Image (cartoon, helix red, strand yellow):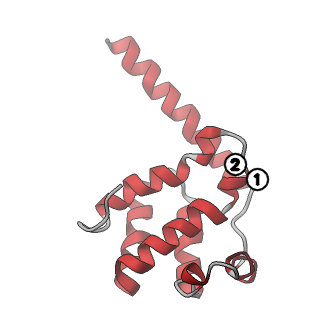
């Protein structure tokens, strides 16, 4: 059993390193670029200001730091409740470089953020 646990931890470590390297090579868009990407999605655009941009960028730039992701999620929630939290999660998940990847592990990072956001508020359901 210990050997399987060790293999599992190694696998997780490799996945996390893959995601961190992807983030280094594929930076989060600047604020103006994100607004352009969101132009057609008014329900998201309305929930995305400069403060939200900073929170989303920090979440994107620190994909394996659950505590920081939860902290930024709480800032988003305090700013605009579930509407802001949900909109900004969608922005990270569907409008960040994650969606440009062909790698399943990287594309699933949005799902990991969903899991982490369960610690933001009781209303969030992953």
- Give the quarter of the figure containing the C terminus: bottom left
- x and y, in percent, of residue 76 in the image: 42, 78
Give the quarter of the image for residue 4: top left
The structure residue drawn at horizontal position 38% and vertical position 56%, both measured from the top left corner, is 116
Q: Position of residue 101 (x, y in %)?
A: 72, 47
List the residue tagged with mark 2: 22
Determine the secondary structure under disc 1.
helix
**Residue located at (31% from left, 12% from top):** 1
Tell me the SS state at disc 2. Answer: helix
How many numbered dots are placed on residues in this image?
2
Q: Residue at the spot x=51%, y=73% of the render?
A: 88
Q: Quadrant of residue 63?
A: bottom right
Cα distance between the residues tagged 1 and 2: 5 Å
Residue highlighted by disc 1: 25
Residue 92 placement: quadrant? bottom right
The residue carrying pointer 2 sits among few (fewer than 14), some (14 to 19) or many (20 or more) residues within 10 Å by Cα, namely some
Looking at the image, which is closer to me, 3 or 53?
Answer: 53
Q: Are marks 1 and 2 in contact (CB under 8 Å)?
A: yes
Q: Position of residue 14 (x, y in %)?
A: 58, 32
Image spot of residue 41 (x, y percent): 63, 78
Q: Nearer the viewer, residue 38 or 71?
A: 38
Circle 1: is it few (<14), some (14-19), or many (20+) Cα within 10 Å? Answer: few
């Amino acid at each position: 059993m210990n050997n399987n646990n060790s293999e599992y931890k190694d696998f997780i470590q490799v996945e996390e390193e893959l995601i961190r390297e992807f983030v280094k090579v594929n930076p989060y868009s600047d604020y103006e670029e994100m607004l352009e990407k969101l132009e057609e999605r008014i329900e998201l655009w309305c929930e995305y200001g400069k403060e939200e941009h900073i929170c989303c960028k920090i979440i994107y730039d620190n994909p394996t730091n659950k505590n920081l992701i939860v902290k930024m999620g709480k800032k988003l929630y305090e700013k605009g409740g579930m509407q802001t939290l949900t909109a900004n999660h969608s922005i990270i998940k569907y409008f960040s470089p994650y969606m440009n990847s062909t790698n399943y592990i990287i594309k699933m990072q949005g799902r990991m953020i969903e899991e982490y956001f369960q610690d933001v508020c009781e209303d969030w359901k992953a």
